[in-house]
Image: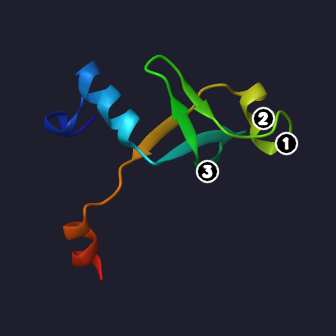
Amino acid sequence: MRRKDKQITDRTMMDKILKEAEILHLALSDNGTPYALCMNFGYDGEAIYIHGALEGKKMDILKANPVVSFQGRLRLSDHQERGRQ
């Protein structure tokens, strides 16, 4: 990570973000081609659970390459939302 000052390494903070996040952005690689999804998810403090069928494109990609990246998206505050209008 280029901006080490922005990196979150504290597990307590990571847990807080995942527990408060409303959406999970999941990034996969399909034979070198990026494949990104916006997903509902659950987090129990130990594991992230994503919603989806047991078959289909996402599962095919995961079976071929289980390496993923993700980002939890927090709800914007009312102040931030007003500023974007």
| Label 3 neighbour load within 10 Å: few <14, some 14-19, many 20+ | few
Q: Amino acid at mark 2?
A: Met
Tell me how far mark 1 sits from mark 3, CA to CA. 13 Å
Q: Position of residue 30 (x, y in %)?
A: 71, 41
Q: Is residue 57 above or below residue 82?
A: above
Q: Residue at x 61, y 50 (%)?
A: 37
Q: Which residue is mark 1?
A: 56
Image mark for residue 74: none
Tell me how far mark 1 sits from mark 2, CA to CA. 5 Å
Image mark for residue 59: 2
Q: Residue at x 66, y 25 (%)?
A: 66
Q: Is residue 27 above or below residue 47?
A: below
Q: Which residue is mark 3?
A: 37
Q: How many marks?
A: 3
| Label 1 neighbour load within 10 Å: few <14, some 14-19, many 20+ | few
Sequence order check, earlier mark of 2 and 3: 3
Labels 1 and 3 touching (C-beta < 8 A): no
Quarter holding the N terminus? top left
Q: Secondary structure at mark 1?
A: loop
Q: Amino acid at mark 3?
A: Leu
Tell me how far mark 2 sits from mark 3, CA to CA. 12 Å
Labels 1 and 2 touching (C-beta < 8 A): yes
Q: Residue at x 35, y 50 (%)?
A: 74
Q: Secondary structure at mark 3?
A: strand
Give the quarter of the image for residue 84.
bottom left
Outermost residue, top side:
46
Q: Residue at x 19, y 69 (%)?
A: 79
